[in-house]
């Protein structure tokens, strides 16, 4: 499918930002900070998905895509004042496909669609608010598209416990700026992308050894130039379920398994680009934090 759009496809490619992702789809662009005595922490994992979908742009939809990642965090500030904490992080992310549709002819790394590295920071303030900023660069070992880079910022509100002990809404607002390069993050280089989202969720069996978090992720992809003249890129919604694997010895880290589903309604630009007016993204993620 991707090769049918090569003249346009060279204009984009990007990553899932840090571990809040399911198949390159950001739930909220802030890193998960495991509780730890050390100022250093991290998480690593892999997401399996039925396609490589980034902000509604389908890069690979044949076979299965594997998206391993590693995030390393350092908490550099902690206080009880207005600024509650500050942390910095380094992230590595890859997309490896079971097919080679995206790779250049004769490329020996044909399954290795993309490799990304990113630097960022998170500032938590006023007890429930956080701001995360990320700078990201990517390359395609398979030579499917050129290199590029972008920066983003996300403002998020943690309403845990305000409405109910086990329920929260977790709204967020993400702004992304494509910074140019050989390929753009969206359909037009040097453009803005905006993503408002909300994630109502409830924790079942919260007092047991195996609590289950059930969520409904709802988000929209917006950006006039980003989507080549149309402000509306997509609206996506679907359930997300995660379960901690507490039967694994804590000395091996904190393990979590999650599954997700998103239904995408595309605007006219993405409909023309993707060759369809809607799409379904299914993901499975296995992760460990340490």
Image: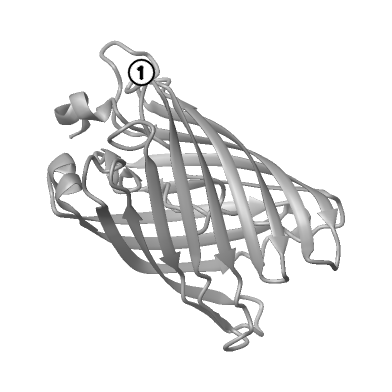
Q: Measured from the top left, where is residue 92 in percent x and y? A: 58, 35
Q: Looking at the image, is 176 positioned above or below residue 140?
A: below
* Viewport quadrant of the N terminus: top left
- Residue under the point 32% across and 53% down: 222
Q: Measured from the top left, where is residue 156 in percent x and y? A: 57, 63
Which residue is situated farthest in the bottom direction here? 164
Using residue 239 as the reference point, say whether residue 70 is left or right of it.
Answer: right
- Residue under the point 35% across and 47% down: 55
Using residue 26 as the reference point, say whether residue 185 is left or right of it.
Answer: left
- Residue under the point 78% across and 66% down: 82
Using residue 8 as the reference point, say whether residue 127 is left or right of it.
Answer: right
Instruction: Using the image as rendered, state which of residue 201 and residue 155 is in the foreground.
Output: 155
Using residue 252 as the reference point, say whether residue 118 is left or right of it.
Answer: left
Q: Measured from the top left, where is residue 50 in percent x and y? A: 31, 48
Secondary structure beneath label 1? loop
Q: Looking at the image, is 176 positioned above or below residue 195?
A: above
Q: Measured from the top left, where is residue 100 in percent x and y? A: 29, 26
Q: Looking at the image, is 2 positioned above or below residue 290?
A: above
Residue linked to disc 1: 143
- Residue under the point 71% across and 60% down: 124
Instruction: Using the image as rendered, state which of residue 130 and residue 273 is in the foreground.
Output: 130
The quadrant holding residue 64 is top left
Q: Looking at the image, is 51 positioned above or below residue 146?
A: below
Which residue is situated farthest in the top direction here? 106
Q: Can residue 29 be seen in this snapshot?
A: yes
The quadrant holding residue 155 is bottom right
Instruction: Using the image as rendered, state which of residue 59 and residue 265 is in the foreground.
Output: 265
Other residues around mark 1 within 10 Å, as few (<14) / some (14–19) / many (≥20): many
């Amino acid at each position: 499918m991707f090769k049918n759009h090569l003249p346009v496809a060279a204009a984009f490619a990007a990553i899932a930002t840090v571990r809040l992702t399911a198949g390159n789809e950001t739930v909220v662009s802030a890193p998960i900070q495991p509780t730890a005595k050390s100022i250093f922490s991290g998480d690593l994992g892999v997401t399996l998905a039925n396609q490589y979908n980034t902000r509604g742009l389908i890069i690979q939809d044949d076979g299965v895509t594997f998206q391993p990642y590693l995030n390393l965090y350092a908490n550099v500030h902690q206080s009880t004042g207005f600024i509650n904490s500050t942390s910095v992080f380094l992230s590595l992310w890859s997309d490896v496909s079971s097919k080679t549709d995206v790779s250049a002819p004769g490329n020996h790394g044909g399954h290795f669609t993309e490799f990304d590295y990113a630097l960022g920071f998170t500032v938590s303030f006023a007890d429930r608010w956080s701001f995360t900023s990320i700078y990201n660069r990517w390359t395609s070992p398979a030579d499917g598209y050129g290199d590029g880079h972008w920066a983003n910022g996300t403002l998020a509100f943690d309403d845990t416990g305000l409405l109910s002990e086990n329920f929260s809404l977790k709204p967020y607002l993400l702004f992304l700026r494509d910074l140019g390069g050989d390929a753009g993050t969206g359909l037009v280089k040097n453009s803005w992308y905006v993503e408002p989202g909300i994630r109502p969720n409830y924790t079942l069996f919260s007092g047991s050894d195996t609590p289950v978090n059930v969520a409904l992720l709802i988000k929209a992809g917006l950006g006039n130039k980003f989507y080549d003249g149309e402000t509306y890129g997509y609206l996506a919604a679907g359930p997300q379920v995660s379960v901690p694997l507490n039967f694994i010895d804590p000395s091996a880290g904190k393990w979590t398994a999650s599954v997700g589903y998103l239904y995408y309604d595309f605007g006219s630009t993405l409909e023309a680009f993707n060759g369809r007016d809607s799409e379904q993204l299914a993901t499975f993620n296995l992760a460990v934090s340490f």
